[in-house]
Image (cartoon, rainbow, N blue to C red):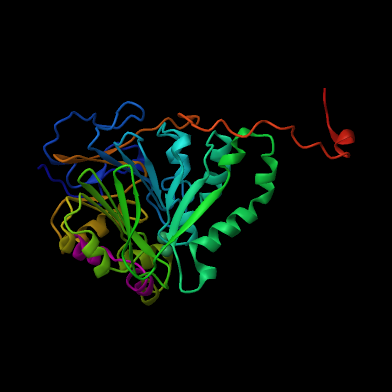
Amino acid sequence: MVSREISESTPLASEGSDTPLTSHPVVGTPTRTYAPVLEPGTEDLAPDEVRVTILGSGDPFVRPAQASASVLIEVGNAERDLFFFDLGSGALKNFDGLRLPVTATTKVFLTHLHADHVGDMPTLLFSLAKAGRRDPVEVWGPASSDPALGTAAYVKHLLAAHAWDHESLCGHPGQSGAGAIATEVPYDRTATVYERGGVTISSFPVLHIQNGSVGYRLDYAGRSVVFSGDTLPCRTLVEAAQGVDLLVHETFPTVEVYARKAGVPPAFAEKIVNGVHTSPLMAGTVFARSGARMSVMWHLSVDHETAGSAFREMRTRYDGPVTIAQDLTVFNLTPEAVVTRQAQVDPTAWPVLGPTHISGPPMHPLHEPPAWWADARLTD
Ligand SMILES: [Zn+2]
Ligand SMILES: [Zn+2]
């Protein structure tokens, strides 16, 4: 294995680099050839392969370089299922560049209901229905000790808040896709929450501020991925992540760098980094105790200062393969290897429809225009 370290001088994707921030671009010995950069639409998944793409690598402050929290997992089953894990603001902008079918955007697993993990939900539910999805979206997410704070309540109110959009779709064949079905997963114990098409997904409780935060593990064809969501370092996650192929774990900047960049006193930075989230140091501990083939520092605001210092601090606890996630970092998981690359997307791509098994409701006449439009409309 060729290894390299990340420092303050390592080029970033936001500067045009197409090299991922990883210590080990290849772990193992792949039996197929991978292009140095993933060009969407050019690589089929093998039946035993899993591809994980970071759609949103950033923090709550969505910026041109980084969308907020979101991870996409594709599996090589006959259905070519894809799964969103969290869907923060800007995530679907990156998804659209991947040339994957809109008709497959029907499964979302939410770790918790912080806005940086759900900001693109209205776009998924309503705008991708206009782009051609005919099935409603199934949304899994944590229950809470207070039902008003659970995922079912969130989805119900999200739909209610977008009643105007839904009503406007009267006559549009996408109206059947502009909906959501919520399934709550336990907030206080590990549970199997999805078993279809050879894919098993389990949830496990994590420690993030209050009841109602979980992480997920996906298993398919012998491959496995664990996604932490937001959490303090915790035993439940380490147990779920034993020997997985890919562990995507939240990591904040070091306390010192966070205090300086956020302009807050060190004591406050300490509260955020070590009281609510996971420091690079503790990410190193979690990686060492989990033993994943590839461990990923994710949810880090990536610039030269944060990436270099976070990587160095993590390295005091763990010396295995580690990647710092950027938007569109891609991991191909096979029995033989874990390959880490960046995807290069067409920034002007239109949505790709994909096969659909529902023809949509019959087109009924659009709404009668309000009477006062007759005076207001320009027609030539
Ligand atoms: Zn959070
Ligand atoms: Zn977050």
Relative horizontal placement of residue 177, taking residue 170 as reference (left or right): left
The answer to whether residue 25 is above or below residue 277 is above
Q: Looking at this view, is 9 or 96 the one in front? A: 96
Is residue 284 on the magenta stretch?
yes
Residue 354 screen position, x and y as percent: 45, 29
Q: Is residue 61 visible?
A: no
**Closer to the camera in the image, 185 or 120:** 185
Q: Residue furthest top?
A: 380
- Main SS, magenta residues: helix
Residue 146 visible in the current orientation: yes
Residue 282 spot, x, y in % from top left: 24, 67
Q: Which residues are magenta?
A: 270-287
Quadrant occupied by the C terminus: top right
Where, quadrant-wise, is the N terminus in this rendering? top left
Relative to 370, 174 lies left or right: left
Front-most of residues 58 and 76: 76
The residue sitting at 18% across, 59% down in the picture is 242
Residue at figure coordinates x 42%, y 72% from the top left = 211
Q: Position of residue 97 (x, y in %)?
A: 43, 34
Q: Residue at x 32, y 72 (%)?
A: 274
